[in-house]
């Protein structure tokens, strides 16, 4: 008879897959704007040798292609438009549907990668727990529902880690280069990790892949790079300037969908002070990380890489759905040949906090709160940005674990 826990995990897996299908895939076959609109419209303009960062052209194309009347302000890198361009030969609804399917398959690929990296097989009960945790992770559901490329990017990154762990440096580098072309602020940290590990063949393959993509993507438009950059930075100011949807300051009512630590600091220190302190924390964490790697070169690669990625969330722009890449830590938490210890239990508890969609509750609850609460320091700096605080604690715990000598149990005394 199947063990009760495995049965429970199987039920969770089926329910989560059902959520991806009925709330992600089924609604995708419609018209209207979502997170895929930017790369789709930009890729369409790029394929027709038109400046993808021209807001007027992008908005007009968006209305014609997607049926949405909303303004389109593209900010994806040109390499992303190159990679997405094959989907633009299809009608919007079909392209959107294909992306939703790819996103769901990407989550499944992440689950299989985590199981493989942990040393388990699907015959082990732990493998079912891992799969259930990955499929239940809220950020993956959000990303698939809103049609964001972060799930596909995360899947490519973790597949590259699996290949790298099996001496497949060439394919690993190519996939990592492709992932970085889609979402540079995710893929670049994997490059940094393998640079520290001196995996030069992997780095060369990834750099050549992304370099070729960059040259081709710029050459296709037929404009000088300076012309593209002018439009691009104008669009960046739209999104990241005061009140923009990616702005971490109080001027943005949707700021709690972000995960960078400036969110916590802005109400206390202001925009410039928040950026300076967050950058200091990130730099300090990076310095400790480098020291730990040099001191303990035999440490778990999954632990080391996840720690670096977690630290990147402190000073660099990220949305909550980017936290899906942190599922890589599960491979270390559930290693087949290691027992649980205090540090792993604390890290798992913090991971489970990240698993929950609390930021959605914070955003939606604001319409029911009093103005005094919404403008209070404790709401804006302590309660609502819970993801940023969790990521800070997560980073500290992982750094502590990383500093322990390989082969010795990690303890918090």
Image (spheres, rainbow, N blue to C red):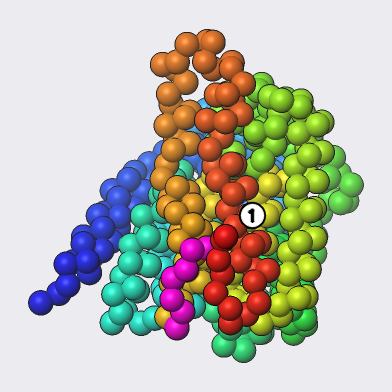
In the rendered structure, the answer to whether residue 165 lies left or right of residue 239 reads: left
In the rendered structure, the answer to whether residue 230 lies left or right of residue 80 reads: right
In the image, what residue occupies the spot 75% across and 50% down? 282
| Residue 180 visible | no
Q: Pick the residue in front: 76 or 286.
A: 286
Please identify the dominant SS of the magenta region: loop
> In which quadrant of the rendered view does residue 172 lie?
bottom right
Q: Position of residue 18 (x, y in %)?
A: 26, 54
- The vertical placement of 80 against 158, above or below, is above
> Which residue in the protein does label 1 denote?
396
Residue found farthest to the left = 1
| Quarter of the figure that contains the C terminus | bottom right
| Residue 77 visible | yes
In the image, what residue occupies the spot 49% across and 52% down? 350
- The vertical placement of 84 against 363, above or below, is below
In the rendered structure, the answer to whether residue 213 lies left or right of residue 38 reads: right
Please state the extent of the stretch shown in magenta in the rendering.
337-343
Residue 339 falls within the magenta-colored stretch: yes
Q: Position of residue 222 (x, y in %)?
A: 81, 54
């Amino acid at each position: 008879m199947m063990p009760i826990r495995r049965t429970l995990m199987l039920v969770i897996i089926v329910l989560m897959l059902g959520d991806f299908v009925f709330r992600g895939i089924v609604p995708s076959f419609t018209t209207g704007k979502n997170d895929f609109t930017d790369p789709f419209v930009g890729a369409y303009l790029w394929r027709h040798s038109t400046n993808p960062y021209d807001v007027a052209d992008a908005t007009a194309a968006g209305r014609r292609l997607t049926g949405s009347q909303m303004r389109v302000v593209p900010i994806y890198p040109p390499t992303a438009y190159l990679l997405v361009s094959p989907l633009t030969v299809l009608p919007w609804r079909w392209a959107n549907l294909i992306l939703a399917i790819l996103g769901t398959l990407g989550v499944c690929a992440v689950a299989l990668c985590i199981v493989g990296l942990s040393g388990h097989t699907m015959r082990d009960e732990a493998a079912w727990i891992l799969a259930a945790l990955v499929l239940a992770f809220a950020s993956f559901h959000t990303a698939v529902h809103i049609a964001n490329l972060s799930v596909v990017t995360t899947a490519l990154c973790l597949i590259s880690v699996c290949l790298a762990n099996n001496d497949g440096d060439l394919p690993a580098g190519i996939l990592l280069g492709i992932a970085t072309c889609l979402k540079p602020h995710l893929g670049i940290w994997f490059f940094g990790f393998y640079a520290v590990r001196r995996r030069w063949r992997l780095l060369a393959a990834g750099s050549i892949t992304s370099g070729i993509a960059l040259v081709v993507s710029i050459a296709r438009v037929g404009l000088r790079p300076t012309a593209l950059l002018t439009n691009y930075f104008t669009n960046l100011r739209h999104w990241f300037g005061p009140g923009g949807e990616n702005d971490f300051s109080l001027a943005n009512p949707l700021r709690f969908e972000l995960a960078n630590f400036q969110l916590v600091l802005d109400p206390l220190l202001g925009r410039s002070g928040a950026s300076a302190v967050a950058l200091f924390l990130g730099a300090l964490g990076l310095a400790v990380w480098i020291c730990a790697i040099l001191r303990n070169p035999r440490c778990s690669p999954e632990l080391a890489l996840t720690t670096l990625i977690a630290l990147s969330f402190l000073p660099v722009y990220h949305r909550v759905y980017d936290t899906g890449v942190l599922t890589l830590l599960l491979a270390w938490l559930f290693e087949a040949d290691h027992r649980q210890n205090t540090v792993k239990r604390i890290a798992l508890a913090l991971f489970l906090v990240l698993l929950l969609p609390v930021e959605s509750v914070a955003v939606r609850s604001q319409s029911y709160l009093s103005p005094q609460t919404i403008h209070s320091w404790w709401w804006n700096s302590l309660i609502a940005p819970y993801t940023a605080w969790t990521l800070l604690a997560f980073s500290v715990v992982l750094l502590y674990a990383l500093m322990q000598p390989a082969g010795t149990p990690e303890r918090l005394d």
